[in-house]
Amino acid sequence: MTNARVLGERLMPGEGLLWDATRIAAANLLLALCAHVAIPIPGNPVPFTLQTFGVLLVAVLLGSRRAAIVTSLYLLEGAMGLPVFQPFGLPGAARLLGPTAGYLWAYPPAALVTGWFAERLNWKDRSWVNVGPLALAVLAGHAIILTGGWAWLAAIPQVAAAGSIPAAGWARAFAIGVLPFLLDAIIKTALVVTVARGMDRVRPD
C-alpha cells in the first residue's frame, strides 16, 4: 500500500472491512495483555502497568480512527466484566468510576491525538528524521492520559474513599496520580518509538 498513512497499514497491507476488523482485534488483544502486566504501588490506588504503552503503540500503528475504536471497545469490554483491565481494582463497570477511571476515560482521546500525529509522519522514510515527531506524538498521548487521571483524582470526592486517598485536592492528586508516572511516561515513550522503529524495519516495501 504505497498510500498507507500509518505503519499498521504497511505491516498488514490489505484493504476492506475484514482487514480493519483483523487489525482492531489484534490491537484489542494487545491492550488486554498489556493491562495484565501490572505492579501495585503501596499506598497508591494507581499501579504501574503497560496499559498506556499498549494504547499509544496502537495509536502509532493504526492511526486516529482505528485506535479510538480499539480503546472505546476496550472500555466497553471492561465495563461488561471481561477480564481486560489491570487486575488491581474494582470489577467491571465499577472500574470506570473508581480511582483509575480518569486514566481509562482518557484512552480514546489520547489514542485519537497520537494517532492523528502518526498519520502525518512520513513512514516511507526509514531514517531517524521521524523519531522526534514520533516521540512528541506519544508524549502528547501520555499528557492527555495523565491529565485525565489527575483531574479525576482531584475532582471526584468518592475517589478518596475508594482509594484511601486523603481529600487534599489538586496538589495531592498530582503527587499520587502524576508525579510517580512522569519517568514511566518517558520510558514508555522510548519503548513505543523503539518498537515502532523495529517494526518499521521489517515492514513490506
Image (spheres, rainbow, N blue to C red):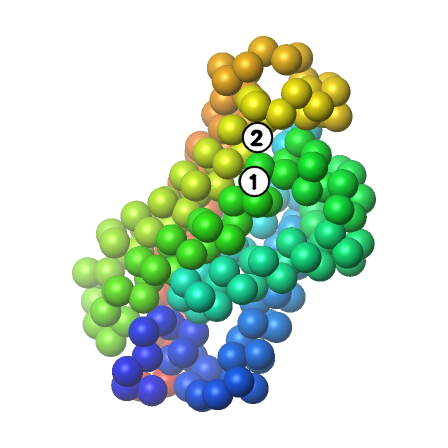
Residue shown at 46% from the left, 34% from the top:
147
Residue 50 position within the rendered picture, expressed as x and y whole percent measured from the top left:
58, 48
According to the image, label 2 marks what residue? 152
Q: Which amino acid does label 2 sit on?
A: Trp
Q: Residues within 10 Å of mark 2 (few under 14, many from 20)?
A: many
Q: Residue at x 41, y 39 (%)?
A: 143
Q: Position of residue 38 (x, y in %)?
A: 67, 43
> In the figure, 118 relative to 189: above or below?
below
Q: Kindly identify which numbered label has been placed on residue 103.
A: 1
> Mark 1–mark 2 contact, CB under 8 Å?
yes
User: Element type at marker 1?
Assistant: helix
Does 161 sit left or right of 61 as displayed?
right
Depth check, mark 1 against mark 2: the one in front is: 2
Name the element at disc 2: helix
Q: Quadrant of residue 98?
A: top right
- Could you say where residue 14 lies in the image, as x and y percent from the top left? 45, 88
**Amino acid, disc 1:** Tyr
- In this rendered view, identify the residue nearer to me: 67 or 93: 93
- Do we see residue 43 in this rendering? no
Identify the residue at horizontal 52%, vertical 49% (top origin).
Answer: 107
Expressed as whole percent of the image width and height from the top left, the position of residue 133 reads 25, 54
- Crowding around mark 1 (Cα neighbors within 10 Å: few <14, some 14 to 19, many 20+) is many
